């Protein structure tokens, strides 16, 4: 049996967790409200931009596990298109279900990953400072390996042939 968790359900449950501030059980699964999470707000005006750090985190965790984008998407049961957007588009707001699935797959706390993804607000400003510091330090400066170089050259060739 496959259970479909909608975006609206995730948002309602996250708001309920934050409002109650207590441990609770939802559908047989235990959920603990994060003391750092104060609100669920999908608008970008209310919080610093952490999507760069979130995308880099997902990319590095995937690479650490030596997974392709496709294999991570399959293992975490998320859409491969959204995973590409998370890693490549700094302005992409991921679905709460996707962040939950990634947190479960990477074995990191869901509330923290929700904050990093920009889906909830942290009380502590140092969280955002650390996220930006992580993003700045995680940018690779190493040379392309042979596989990356060949893929880039092949793609440049395709781009060059298109008018």
Image (cartoon, rainbow, N blue to C red):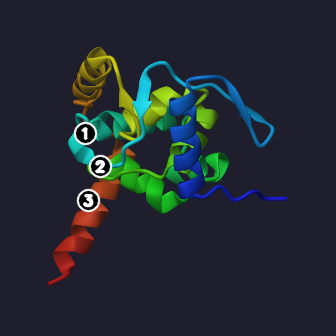
Residue indicated by mark 3: 153
- Looking at the image, is mark 2 or mark 3 earlier in the sequence? 2
Residue at the image point whose x is 29% and y is 49% from the top: 43
Secondary structure type for disc 1: helix
Q: What element carries label 3?
A: helix
The picture places residue 95, in percent across and down from the top left corner, at 48, 52
> Where residue 11 appears, x then y in whole percent?
52, 48
Give the quadrant of the C terminus: bottom left
Residue 146, percent across and down?
35, 44
Q: Residues within 10 Å of mark 1 (few under 14, many from 20)?
A: few
* Residue under label 2: 43
Residue depicted at x 17% and y 74%:
160
Relative placement, left or right, of 102 versus 132 is right
Q: Nearer the viewer, residue 47 or 149?
A: 47
Marks 2 and 3: CB-CB under 8 Å? no
Residue matched to label 1: 46
Callout 3 environment at 10 Å: few (<14), some (14 to 19), or many (20+)? few
| Residue closest to the far left | 163
Which numbered disc flags the more N-terminal residue, 1 or 3? 1
| Identity of the residue drawn at 45% across and 57% down | 82
Alpha carbon separation for disc pair 2 and 1: 6 Å
Q: Can residue 100 be seen in this view?
A: yes
């Amino acid at each position: 049996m496959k259970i479909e968790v909608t975006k609206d359900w995730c948002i309602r449950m996250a708001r309920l967790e934050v409002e109650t501030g207590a441990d609770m059980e939802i559908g047989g699964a235990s959920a603990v409200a994060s003391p750092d999470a104060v609100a669920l707000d999908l608008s970008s005006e209310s919080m610093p931009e952490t999507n760069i750090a979130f995308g880099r985190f997902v990319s590095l965790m995937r690479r650490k596990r030596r997974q392709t984008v496709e294999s991570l998407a399959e293992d975490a049961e998320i859409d491969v298109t959204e995973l590409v957007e998370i890693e490549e588009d700094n302005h992409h707001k991921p679905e709460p279900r996707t962040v939950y699935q990634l947190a479960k797959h990477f074995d990191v706390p869901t509330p923290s990953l929700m904050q990093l993804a920009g889906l909830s607000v942290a009380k502590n400003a140092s969280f955002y400072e650390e996220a930006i510091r992580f993003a700045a330090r995680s940018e690779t400066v190493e040379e392309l390996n042979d596989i990356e170089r060949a893929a880039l050259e092949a793609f440049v060739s395709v781009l060059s042939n298109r008018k």
